[in-house]
Amino acid sequence: MDLMLIAKAIGALAVIGLGTSAVLATAAKRFHVEVDPRIEAVAAALPGSNCGACGNASCFAAAEGIAAGEKPVNACVAGGQKVADAIALILGAEACATAAVISARHCGGGIAAVRSYTYSGVTSCAAASRLAGGPLACSAGCLGFGDCARACPFGAISMDERGLPVIDPVKCTGCGICVRECPRGHITLLEMVPEAAPVVVRCSAHDKVKGRKANCSMCCIACKKCEKECPSDAIHVIDMLAVVDYDKCTGCGTCVAVCPQKCIDLYGRVEGVDAVVADGAGPESQAAPLQVGA
Amino acid sequence: MSTVSQLALLFIGAALVNNILLTRFIGLCPFFGVSGNMETSVGMSLAVVFVMMMASSATWAVWEYVLAPLGVGEFLYIPAFILIIASLVQFVEMYLRKASPILYRAMGIYLPLITTNCAVLATATEAAKPGFFKMNIALGASLSLGEALIYTLGVSVGFGFALVTFAALRERLDLAPVSRLFKGSPIAFITAGLLSLAYVGMSGWFGL
């Protein structure tokens, strides 16, 4: 063993390490840039998960924008009203109301949906959707590999035994990352809906109804029962798919009860509804019409 | 010892014949990562030229004055060079932030991104301790500082050239009538392969 060589190696690395750290320490002092102290305060008030929903690359970049007055105090989507109020307090600006949204899944197919071929590649929706549009016969359904669940920085999405992502409306902050990650997000498989949205349609297909039923037993068959029965004219079949108008919906639950396909669910941050439990359970579990929050 | 023609050969050899991206296949992550649009690829190329030149000068000096005299360079060069390049980029970032906020804004995102990029490390190593790429230029066992810098400039310009070309191709590809199965990454990989073939076609030029 050449002890001299070992000593030299340790010495050389130590010299380089100490030298560079000394230079860096001096530079940190010497080239210190005075930053607006409000930026630090705003950054501390933000959630710090760097979700990017506001359009900035990081929470710190958003804090710079907010402190400089380029962005409104309610720029943080994930933080919602609470964070907006805290930032408004720091900056002395008037807080304005934020429109809170949460993510909703428009599909009830999961592993029950018909496959047009057997996919055995990488377990990722993005990869699967690039192979001839994905293994599902339905062009709009959930591929079920959980890209959204992995992408969610708040742990609000979990995959259940049906192969579908279940979104916890309490944990969901509305950052919209899942919608961007979902390869079918642009055809509203995942969509941001108002946080108090009482019902959600579990289908996003726009194919012909006949072929659609062969592809998936859970789909909307455009029978218009919900449209006829709705007392407040809030649900309409548009392009062969039931769509809820959340401005009018009162959450009476009539559509949930009449849907023959059971593809309409109770959802949202509504008092008395555990949306995670209600997910896909159909009207049986929620026989009594619900009361929308006081 | 080097003549002007030899230096020119060194530059061309580094930039085109032994293009680091398409002939050597080093630094492929930014090649696919930031070639989505023209603007970011140009920014990335400029940052790479800048960082590679700084890194090569630093590693050359450390090799020449610390590692080689002590006889520990053969097995210590990779940790030493990583350490030096990482702290150098940190230092440059701090300096730029103070001295030129505009340049800092323009390069800010790319500087930390390429701190430990394999292309930067490979070039800085090759400049200080040649022999890995085996280019047939009679320049002796080690490069002088000038030669090392010209070599590095060649590599980084070649990197930028390949990256910007590929970004331009990808922008065209977005509009091209590509089959549904090949749209997106698959056709990009195929294009990169064809582009690489074109570059490999230059091997042997000027006896390099």
Image (cartoon, helix red, strand yellow):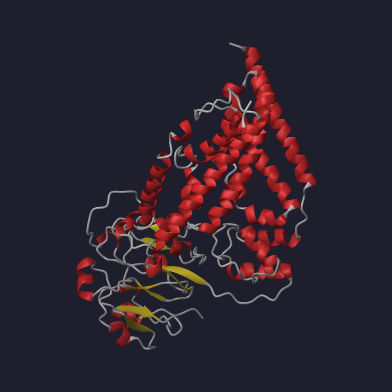
Q: The N terminus of chain B is located in which quarter?
A: top right
Residue A124 shows up from this direction? no
> Which residue shows up at 29% across the image and 65% down it?
A109
- In this view, the residue in front, B132 or A48, is B132
- Furthest residue toward top: A1
A289 versus A75 height, above or below: below
* Residue at (48, 45) in percent of width and height: B29
User: In this rendering, is residue A278 above or below B8?
Assistant: below
Number of residue marks: 0
Q: Classify residue A180 by image quadrant.
A: bottom left
Position of residue A21 in the picture relative to residue A217 (left or right): right
Residue farthest to the right, as pictured:
A30
Decide if residue B198 is on the left or right side of residue A75: left
At which x and y percent is residue B147?
62, 32
Residue A5, image x, y percentages: 63, 15
Q: Foreground residue, B159 or A189?
A: B159
Say which residue appears at 66% left-offset and 31% top-offset: B145
In the rendered image, residue B206, in percent from the top left (x then y), is placed at 48, 34
- Residue B62 appears at what percent x and percent y? 67, 29
Q: Is residue A4 left or right of residue A229?
A: right
B76 in relation to A208, above or below: above
* Residue A260 appears anywhere in the view: yes
Q: Nearer the viewer, residue A276 or A173?
A: A173
